[in-house]
Amino acid sequence: MPGIALVGTQWGDEGKGKVTDLLAEKTDLVVRYQGGNNAGHTIVVEGERYALHLVPTGILYPHCIPVIGPGVVVNPSVLIEELDTLEERGIETGRLLLSGNAHLIMPYHLELDRVTERRLGKNRLGTTKRGIGPAYADKATRIGLRVQDLLDPKIFSAKLEVALKEKNLLLTRVYGRLPLEQKEIEGDYLAFADRLGPHITDTDRVVQGALDEGKTVLFEGAQATLLDLDHGTYPFVTSSNPIAGGACAGAGVGPRDIEQIIGISKAYCTRVGTGPFPSEADPADGEILVEAGQEYGTTTGRKRRCGWFDVVGARFAARLNTLTELVITKLDVLSEFERIKVCVGYSYEGKRYDHMPPNQTIFNKCRPIYEELPGWSQDITGARSLEDLPKEARSYLEMLENLVDTPISWVSVGPSRDQIVRLQGAP
Ligand code: GDP
Ligand code: IMO
Ligand code: MG
C-alpha cells in the first residue's frame, strides 16, 4: 500500500489524530506536510491521553517513522519540549526525522502574530498566536530561516541579521514594542541545533525511497479544507494548504504517489476562531454540543463554536481533495438530541446554493437550509459494527453518504482507539 493522505474536511479538530492513530498500525511512515504547532491532535491509547502539536502521531508506534516535512513551520523550542514530554512518558523519539528545508518559527513571528491580532481588533482572525502566519509570510518573501540554517552558525547569523533589521523596525516603529536581540536569539537557536541536529535530514528522499519500496506512507494533514489558504474561507483561514494536494508540495512527493485520500468529518461541525459558519447552531444546541463533545481547543483551550453537519462544505471537500472515503467521528455526541439537523444547502436573496457559493459575500450572509431527522437518544459508545447502531443512526449515516456522494468507511463513537465501527471497505 503506497501513499494515503488524511485530511480534515471542515474547520479542523475533526478527530484526525484518532484516525491517524488507527491507521498507524499498518503504516511505516507518518508525514506531517504543513502547518505547525497551531495543530492539536488528541489521541487516547489505553486510557492514556496524548496531545500532539508538531510531532506526527506515528511517534506513538515503535515501528513507525514520524517525519516532519519541508512544508511544516517548526518552532524548535516547542518541538524539543514535545519530544522531552514524550520521552518522560516512555515514548522513544530518536526516530523522528526533520526536514532541513522546513522553515523556522522565530521569536519575532510569535510577537508579530500577537500584535497584528491586537491591531485588527474586531476584525481579528482569532489565530492560535503560534507565529504561523508570519512564518509562512517570511517564507514567501524569502527572508525565512530554515531548519538547515541551524547547522551553520555563520549563515544563521547572517540571515537572522537581515530579517531582524526589518522585524525590529516593524516592532518598534509600528507597534511600539521593544526590539529583539540578535545575540539572545542566536544563543537560544544554536543550542536547539545541538539537540535537533541528529533528527535533521533530507526527508524528501526518505519518503520517496519508502514509497519506491512499497512501504505505506501516511500523509497526516493538520487543520482542514475550509481553513486552506487558497480554498478556505479566506481571510479566516490558516496560512498553509491542508488539502490533499498540499501533501505533494509539503512532503516532496508527486500526485501519483497518493492513492487513497481519507476525509475526516465530525457528525456535526465546529470552528475555532472567527469567520463565517453557516450551520452554526443556536446557543442552546451549541452548548449541548460543546459539553457532550467536550469542544474545547487542544492547543488554546478556547471553546469551539458548534453547529450541524454541513453537506455543502462536505461536498466541496470531497471534490477538492478527491476523497476516496469519509470517516465520520463523534457520532456518539449526537445521542443527546431528539432531532438532528443537517444543513443541505444555503439560501441567499431567494436563491438556493447546493455548492459552495462563488464569493465570500454570499457565504458570509447565506442562511442554512436544514433537513431534520429523528435522533436515537441512546448510548452508542459501545457499538462496534453497523448492526450495533440504532436504525436512526444508520439512516443518518446513509443520508450523509448519499448527499456527499462519498462512501463512509469508519464511524467513530468515542475517543478511545477501540471505539470504532468499521463499515464495508474500511482500510
Ligand atoms: P484533530 O485536531 O482533528 O486531531 O482533533 P482534536 O484532537 O483537536 O479534537 C477531537 C477531539 O475529539 C479529541 O479530544 C478526541 O479525543 C475526541 N474524539 C475523537 N473521536 C471521537 C469520538 O468518536 N467521540 C468522542 N466523544 N470524542 C472523540
Ligand atoms: P487541528 O490540526 C482548528 C484556526 C485558528 C484560526 C485560524 C488561523 O487541530 O485541526 P493560525 O494560528 O493557523 O494562523 O490561525 O485557523 N486553526 C485551527 N482550528 N484546528 C486547528 O488545527 C487549527 N489550526 C488553526 O483558530 O481561526
Ligand atoms: Mg485539533
Image (cartoon, rainbow, N blue to C red):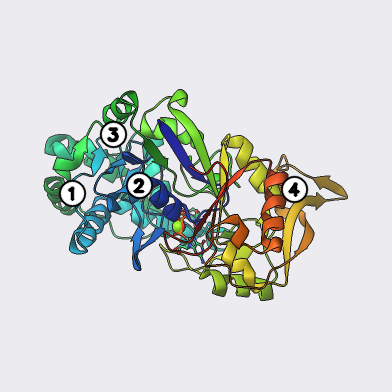
Badge 1 vs badge 4, beta-carbon distance below 8 Å = no
Q: Earlier in the sequence, mark 3 or mark 4?
A: 3
Q: Nearer the viewer, mark 1 or mark 3?
A: 3
Q: Which residue is mark 3?
A: 101
Instruction: Specify the label residue 138 is tagged with.
Output: none
Residue 317 in picture, x, y percent from top left: 61, 42
Distance CA(mark 4)–CA(mark 2) = 43 Å
Q: Which residue is mark 4?
A: 362
Give the left or right position of residue 246, taking residue 190 as reference. right
Q: Earlier in the sequence, mark 1 or mark 3?
A: 3
Residue 79 in picture, x, y percent from top left: 26, 53
Distance CA(mark 3)–CA(mark 4) = 39 Å
Q: Earlier in the sequence, mark 2 or mark 3?
A: 2
Q: Which residue is mark 1?
A: 189
Query: What type is the residue that disc 4 sits on?
Result: Ile
Badge 4 vs badge 2, beta-carbon distance below 8 Å = no
Q: Nearer the viewer, mark 2 or mark 1?
A: 2
Distance CA(mark 2)–CA(mark 3) = 28 Å
Identify the residue at image location x=36%, y=35%. 216
Q: Nearer the viewer, mark 2 or mark 3?
A: 2
Q: Nearer the viewer, mark 4 or mark 2?
A: 2
Q: Which residue is mark 2?
A: 25
Q: Earlier in the sequence, mark 4 or mark 2?
A: 2
Query: What type is the residue that disc 3 sits on?
Result: Asn
Q: Earlier in the sequence, mark 1 or mark 4?
A: 1
Identify the residue at image location x=81%, y=51%. 347
Return the residue nearer the eye: 150 or 11.
Answer: 11
